[in-house]
Amino acid sequence: MTSPPSHLWLNALLQALQCVQSAWLSTLYALGVTGDSHGAPAWPWDVRIAGENLVIDVALARQFGGMLAAIAFALACVLLALFWRRAWRWLLATAVGALVLAPWPSPSLWLTAAVPTSFHTSPTGFTVQSISRGSRVYAAQCVACHGADGRGEGPLASTLHRWPPTMASALLSRRADGELFWHVLYGMRDDRGRTMPGFAGRLSDREIWAALDYMRVLSASAGMAAGGSWPVPIALPSLAVKCANGPTRNIAAWRGNQRVRVVAVDADHPPPFEDPRFLTLLVERNGPSPHQASGIRKVAAQRPERTPKANVTTLFGARADCVADDPEAWQVFAQIAGASPSSVAGTEWLADRDGWLRALAPAGRRGWADGGLMCTTSTVLPDGAQAALRADPLTATLRQMDDDPVRFVKGGFVH
Ligand code: HEC
């Protein structure tokens, strides 16, 4: 996967730009300067700063950063001049000098078209329920053009003057959430006319956000089918989790500090042992009916001598017992793995501490293979990591995941 260099400063710049624009929007809304659109403050201008251009053109980002620094420096000089009267001439001359010497990249490069919902974020929480609802919306309204596999080759596609894009790409991550939403709501055009119809009046806002959630899953599975990996890291879907003796909780509570391993279990693939390196979430075939869930555990208990198919060292000897409390989780996770629901048992997924799915061990493959970690920015492992990889691929994968977090999320492009 080709990826822009992971400069930390670039990530910080993009995060800062996003924060400043959002804070500015909230202020305008609080002052009554702008109204709301589809449940959140409406961006009042038809342009915004194009984080997605800065992230793919580091030279432009550098010039843009230089311009901001020069403006900040000039302002600081002017402020200082107000208090330090004796030096005001020198300070103003320095301010003017900084502005003259600053790089001024063309605004057409760092500004892009915006819509009222540009800064909206999805309200769905990327839950399994929303993804499943989205799959029904997609099957009813979108599949004819975008195709069942999301590669833009549905039966209607060849009748359009522009083919729908393939989702086996980073497209959805490159666009702002709110702009995707707007495009589905009001359609898209090019200079030859309408390219995609709008769904305002036919679909509710909630259905559109759900369809976009589903399209992210579709993008993961289309990427798997096309190149054997996810085009970008996909978020671990949110769902209710039931652990042995505890109350039902949402998996989102684990986000932020815990790595999560998801394992698809059935009667032939018993739950693996707990592993202190991550929390383990079991997804059971046909959902967690009390009868079936206990059935699986009984099988596991009857055959303690059996080596678990999961690729995990037995450390504590206790089997994992936190189960996804959602009957549709099996289907959603199978699709993320690019596998059919009937062959996904035994598959494992790993999510990093920020809640991004990063690695996959498909069913039937023993151990996390070399390069099992997807979406890394560094292609060469340091010597220590190479040695660790030979000794224990899973530990190496976890190390690499921690050392190379998902970046540029706010810039509109991951990695
Ligand atoms: C009549 C065919 C057609 C249907 C039906 C259709 N699309 Fe599209 N879609 C397209 C085409 C063509 C494009 C590319 C448009 C362009 O780039 O100008 C597109 C682009 C998109 C994009 C990318 C938007 C972007 O910002 O680049 C998304 C997301 C999308 N469609 C979602 C949907 C969803 C969700 C549905 C169903 C609710 C749907 N589409 C139904 C034809 C269709």
Image (cartoon, grey):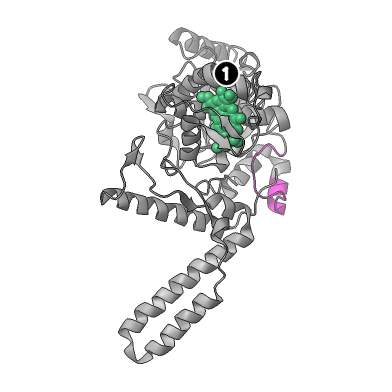
Q: In which quarter of the image is residue 195?
A: top right
382 within the magenta span: yes
User: How many numbered discs?
Assistant: 1
Label 1: which residue? 265
Vertical placement of residue 12 versus 229, above or below: below
Pick the front one: 204 or 233: 204
* Residue appearing at x 32%, y 40% in the figure: 36
- Secondary structure mostly seen in magenta is loop
Residue name at image x 43 percent, y 23 percent: 203
Q: Which amino acid does label 1 sit on?
A: Val
Q: Position of residue 388 (x, y in %)?
A: 69, 45
As displayed, is residue 117 above or below residue 105?
Answer: above
- Which residue is located at x 61 percent, y 54 percent? 6
Compared to residue 391, the image places residue 108 above or below, namely: below
Is 38 left, or right, of 339 in this rendering? left
Q: Which residue occupies the foreground of this view, 189 or 331? A: 189
Q: Quadrant of the N terminus?
A: top right
**Residue 66 on image: x %, y %:** 54, 68
| Residue 38 seen by the camera | yes
Q: Magenta residues?
A: 371-388
- What residue is at 59 percent from the left and 57 percent from the top? 7
Residue 337 is drawn in which quadrant?
top right
Report whether the residue tagged 1 is closer than 8 Å to ligand 1. Answer: no
User: Residue 86, position in %: x, y?
Assistant: 34, 92
Q: In this view, does 363 lie to the left or right of 259?
A: right
Q: Nearer the viewer, residue 217 or 66?
A: 66
Q: State which image quarter holds ligand 1.
A: top right
Q: Estimate how packed mark 1 is, as few (under 14), some (14 to 19) or many (20 or more) residues with alpha carbons within 10 Å.
A: many
SS assignment at label 1? strand
Furthest residue toward front? 192
Is 72 magenta? The answer is no
